[in-house]
Amino acid sequence: EDLEISLALLREAVEKGGGGPAWAAYVGMLIDAGPEYARLGTWRVAPADPESVVRAEEEIAASGRQRRLSLVEVGAIFEAMRAWATAAPENGTPLALETYYLYGLHRDKDALERWEEAGRLPEADSHYQESITATARLLERMGMSPWDALSKSFNSKWLIGGVSTLRQCARIRVYEGRLAEMEGRDEEAIRWWMATVQFGRHVQQSADTLIECLVGIAIEGVGGSPVWVWKPDRETGIPDGPLQGGRLFHGVHHDFFVSQAGEQAAEEVRDSMGRAKVRAMLTRRYVGSLRGVPEGQSMMLRAISIWSGMLLVAFLVVFVAASVVARKEADRATALSRQSGAAIAVACLLPFVAVWVAQWLLDPRLLPEPLGLWAMGVSLLAPILVPLVVVRWTRTANARLRPVWRGNLRRVLPAAILLCAAASLSLGVAARQVAASGAERWHVDTEMERVIRGIGPEWDDPKSPAEAWRAEPPPMVRE
């Protein structure tokens, strides 16, 4: 019932001129609720491998999925996609999504023509960010905080479903290209692959969000894989691969592609895939640094706030334990002043603060991973153990060890508790403010605009590193 209401409301929105985001939401929800099917092209199978084909056929039969769709099942989806395509004649996304259902109807020739048409159009916009923004605004009006509303909007199934369907389409096209080559339909094979590469490029160029850009890179990589294929070092046994720990090698169908499309076309595929891989590396480095990324900054502040709160509880428990028995004896046994105790507390917590500040200012990958755990351990144990270490210098005449230690704890821990309380409270508030500010900035410009600004000139002119590719098939390491 809820789905029917949602579809009716979205249908009303597009009829009233809701534009691209409304069409994307409507089509995405239809896809999410639509029928599923299974063919060899949807099942990650190598058509030249008889054992793989037999195994896939058995798995499809066991899955219970239908092998062929009917027009009755997909009529509403086709109607919506064609209306979207009419409303946005330069956007190839509705045409690309339509090919998935044409393939389910076994109208493979129509699917190829529509896929090529989608690749020729200048845009491939799924309106991901606009749809997220609209959803977030609605959730805010329902009483949700801006950041929570934005976070929830990312998890909309109809958004994720549309993007994942495009990746599925790319895998189908590569399978059909390989099958066409096997059956002697050489020109058709090249058309399947090149249309996939072209569409992947347009998805990257039209992307408003990072996930769309990475999906475009993946589609281009899938489309180009018969010609040039990326392999990680762990599979090839060749160390120091400069492209995400790997290199590009000749694909299985490289020689066939060159014989049909020419060496220059193969080199263009290789260079474009190399640039896309470099951009993927740049985005991962940018996001991994957490600098300039509001969600990363908010998460870091929240993590420090939580740990400070945990330290507060631990120190409070130890302080109470040190004060329960013979409190006055402990106070008489120590010669440590409250000022010195406060200084010790600050010194004990300083490594923890220094590591987090370094992670904030620098790329976290420049710091050894165990360093953060070490700093956390020091911040927990040092305020408890340092008062024990300094017992011999802070004991009064004839005082026993244990009372002196407890007296020292009563001098050091109050300052540590106050520091942790202040840090937990202030950083928790700061995390919420950063999150709210980030949510507002999200609606001002696109995520990709922020990413590209953060990366700098490298994005527009990515340089393929030396040894990024080898003009040979990939050597496979036997396990």
Image (spheres, rainbow, N blue to C red):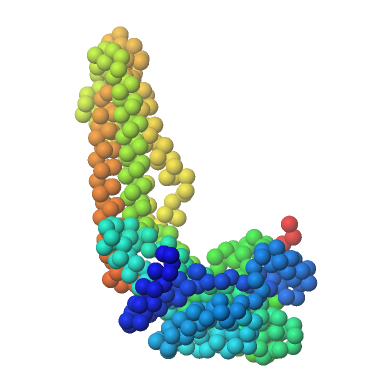
Q: Is residue 426 above or below residue 406?
A: below
- The residue located at (21%, 26%) in the rendering is 338
Front residue of 218/479: it is 218
Which quarter shows the N terminus? Answer: bottom left
Residue at x-position 27% and y-position 58%: 143
Instruction: Please state the horizontal and vertical placement of residue 146, each as a whole percent of the image.
Output: 28, 60
Left or right of 428, for residue 289: right
Single out the residue that lies furthest toward the front: 1
Q: Quadrant of residue 116?
A: bottom right
> In the figure, 475 relative to 119: above or below?
above
Q: Can residue 431 be seen in the rendering of this structure?
A: yes
Please report the residue visible at 54 percent of the width from the left and 65 percent of the height from the top: 244
Q: Residue at x 41, y 72 (%)?
A: 7
Across and down, in percent, residue 271 comes to 55, 80
> Which quadrant of the structure image shows residue 211?
bottom left
Q: Which quadrant does the C terminus fall into?
A: bottom right
